[in-house]
Image: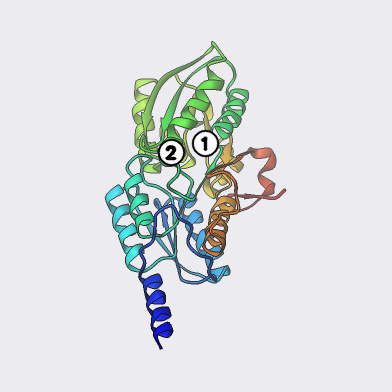
């Protein structure tokens, strides 16, 4: 009887023991809630990110919830709290802010919920179990090289920039600069932040066009801003003389390429790494490991031009 009581007490203590941050959870079968937090599903890129991740989670036997931070760290923090309250077994997070999202990730870890980051990084390694992002430097170089081919080596141009709180914005802009600075005849005469948004892209393009009416090129950090710029250029009757380049590989951008309005877009393989993020979360829950050696994982981008739009199968997917 004493031995039975001792075993029962040991079992109870084991069940009640708090989780130790940094220590792998014991292996278990798939199941439970996988919370997926994206930025803004009104953007087709983030819409695809959430849909693909949710579909992969459900395929693997989990329930999936998709919510959006809209790039706001307070909203993001509240969504992490909700995931903790709902006893999520893992969180797939597109961080709202490279520095500002660190606290939200730490909060999930303290609740013993593994976090896998997609699309954007945070400025601290060793917290998330994995960070899966596009190779933005490689993609920017691809786009800039194509843009020079379309624009020519002598021109005045402007740039539309993504959100400053997102490391991707600076990485893409720096990638453009690395290529474009090699051509002495190319002069960047203006730039404005349009925060990845189509409406802001339109409005900022109007401002830039008024200040620099002689430009012949616009290079953009993403497709939504580029499409906004195209709308403004159409209104001004100048689209035929100005070359616009994008980045993301969205369906609307591909349609604009086919229509001869956008020169190219750089496809981010978001459908691939969103599914893979869920697979790595599943592996971690079952084995205590993601199955991948490196926390940060880069996925190469692909250039889409009028010549290869026929290979575009569905949102952010190219036929091999």
Residue under the image location 69 percent in, 38 percent down:
307
Q: Residue furthest left?
A: 74
Secondary structure at badge 2 equals: helix
Residue in front for this viewpoint, 26 or 39: 26
Residue 244 falls left or right of residue 160: right
Q: Quadrant of the N terminus?
A: bottom left
Residue 8 falls left or right of residue 85: right
Q: Residue furthest top?
A: 184
Above or below 18: residue 226: above
Describe the colour scheme in one phrase.
rainbow
Residue under the image location 52 percent in, 63 percent down:
285
Residue 101 makes an appearance in the image: no
Residue 71 makes an appearance in the image: yes
Residue under the image location 43 percent in, 50 percent down:
94
Horizontal and vertical percent for residue 120? 45, 43
Q: Please identify the quarter of the rendering in which residue 10 is found.
A: bottom left
Above or below 152: residue 109: below
Q: Residues within 10 Å of mark 1 (few under 14, many from 20)?
A: many
Q: Residues within 10 Å of mark 2 (few under 14, many from 20)?
A: many
Question: Which residue lies under the disc numbered 1?
Answer: 246
Q: Earlier in the sequence, mark 2 or mark 1?
A: 2
Horizontal and vertical percent for residue 262? 55, 36
Horizontal and vertical percent for residue 291? 60, 53
Q: Residue furthest front?
A: 2
Q: Between marks 2 and 1, how big is the CA–CA gap?
A: 8 Å
Secondary structure at badge 1 equals: loop
> Disc 2, disc 1: CB below 8 Å?
yes
Residue in front for this viewpoint, 139 or 109: 109
Above or below 317: residue 203: above
Above or below 306: residue 173: above
Tell me the number on the disc at residue 225: 2
């Amino acid at each position: 009887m004493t031995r039975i009581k001792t075993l029962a007490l040991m079992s109870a203590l084991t069940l009640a023991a708090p989780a130790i941050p940094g220590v792998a959870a014991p292996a278990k079968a798939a199941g439970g809630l996988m919370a997926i937090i994206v930025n803004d599903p009104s953007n087709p890129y983030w819409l695809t990110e959430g849909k693909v991740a949710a579909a992969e989670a459900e395929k693997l036997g989990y329930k999936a919830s998709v919510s959006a931070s809209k790039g706001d760290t307070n909203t993001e923090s509240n969504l992490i709290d909700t995931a903790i309250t709902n006893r999520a077994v893992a969180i797939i997070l597109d961080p709202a802010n490279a520095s500002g999202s660190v606290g939200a990730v730490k909060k999930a870890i303290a609740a013993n919920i593994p976090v896998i980051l997609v699309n954007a990084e945070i400025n601290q390694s060793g917290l998330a179990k994995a960070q899966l992002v596009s190779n933005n430097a490689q993609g920017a170089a691809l786009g800039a090289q194509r843009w020079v081919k379309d624009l020519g080596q002598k021109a005045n141009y402007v740039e539309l920039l993504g959100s400053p709180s997102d490391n991707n914005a600076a990485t893409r802009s720096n990638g453009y600069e690395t290529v474009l600075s090699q051509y002495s005849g190319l002069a960047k005469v203006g730039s404005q932040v349009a925060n990845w948004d189509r409406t802001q892209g339109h409005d900022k393009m109007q401002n830039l066009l008024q200040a620099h009416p002689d430009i012949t090129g616009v290079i953009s950090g993403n497709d939504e801003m580029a499409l906004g710029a195209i709308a403004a250029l159409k209104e001004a009757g100048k689209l035929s003389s100005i070359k616009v380049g994008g980045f993301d590989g969205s369906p609307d951008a591909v349609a604009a390429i086919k229509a001869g309005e956008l020169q190219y877009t750089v496809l981010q393989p978001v459908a691939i790494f969103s599914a893979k993020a869920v697979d790595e979360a599943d592996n971690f829950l079952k084995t205590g490991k993601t199955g991948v050696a490196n926390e940060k994982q880069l996925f190469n981008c692909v250039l889409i031009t009028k010549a290869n739009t026929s290979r575009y199968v569905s949102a952010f997917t190219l036929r091999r």
